[in-house]
Amino acid sequence: MVSFPPCKINLGLNILNKRPDGYHNLETCFYPIPWTDILEIIPADTLAFSASGNSIPGREDENLCLKAYNLLHTEYKVPPVKIHLHKVIPMGAGLGGGSSDAAHTLRLLNSIFQLNISAEKLMHYASVLGSDCAFFIQDKPMFGAGRGDELMAIDISLKGKFLVLIKPDVHVSTADAYANVSPNQPEVSLQNTLMTNPISRWKDIVKNDFEESVFKKYPEIQSIKEKMYSLGAVYASMSGSGSSVYALFDSPVLSENFSGLTNWSGVLS
């Protein structure tokens, strides 16, 4: 069975405060984007994992897909499978590709072996694997609070917008991004801001709190955002803790504007 784990962008990201457990409380809107990896899982005599496409750092036995399998194997005695991941979504980009792969491993195993695990319970298992894994259990925008793992549906749509996603040749460490961010409690909640203002107003009121410190260290990322606005973007932002930048346009933009950079573009449906 094959699935196509998508990436995500963050529509705003406010870092509210640091928690006693060392994590940060935040608020953000996760939005799924059809720039996808390819994940295949089939029953097998012995457990096996392989990968192709973009190189995946770290040890193979620490891959999130295998961690997802082991989690369900422990709970449900899931039989051995062969997992193949073709990696397309760039890493270190704030797009959640690894989290998406893990969540879709849970989803595929649930379908293949007819485990009948509810979406709510799958989201619980996913949250064990990573803070934003639970978002990818359902294919719809979600508002995230807490560490990003407290999710609720949000009625927001980018349908018809032309999205450009750019990944520069820069890797932003999530740990460094959090270490240098300045927590701040906004006067108006992000959820309220998104729901009561048209996209045309987001430029001035929807922020990503990571941008200030990341842009200082990596000015080339800021330059990409500025270029998006010079090309007529309605809204542009860094996604997550970086390094990717996305921009929303009312009409398509020529791809040669992004030549030499890893990018994805398309009209959102």
Image: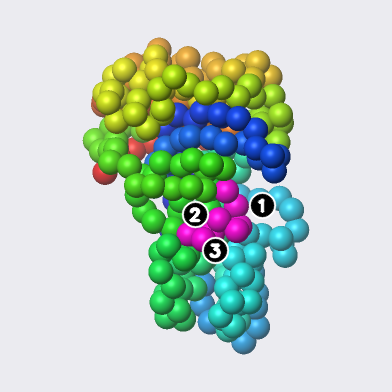
Residue 268 rendering spot, x and y as whole percentages:
30, 40
Q: Residues within 10 Å of mark 3 (few under 14, many from 20)?
A: some
**Residue 56 numbered mark, or none:** 1
**Residue 177 numbered mark, or none:** none
Locate residue 76 relative to residue 115 in the image: left or right. Answer: right
Residue 227 rendering spot, x and y as whole percentages:
46, 16
Q: Residues within 10 Å of mark 1 (few under 14, many from 20)?
A: some
Q: Which residue is found at the position 29% from the left and 38% from the top?
A: 156
- Give the quarter of the image for residue 51: bottom right
Question: What residue range appears in magenta?
Answer: 123-131
Total number of numbered labels?
A: 3
Instruction: Classify mark 3: helix, strand or loop.
Output: helix
Mark 1 or 3 closer to N-term?
1
Please say if 192 is above or below 148. Answer: above
Tell me the chief SS of the magenta region. Answer: helix
- Residue labelled with disc 3: 125
Mark 1 or 2 closer to N-term?
1
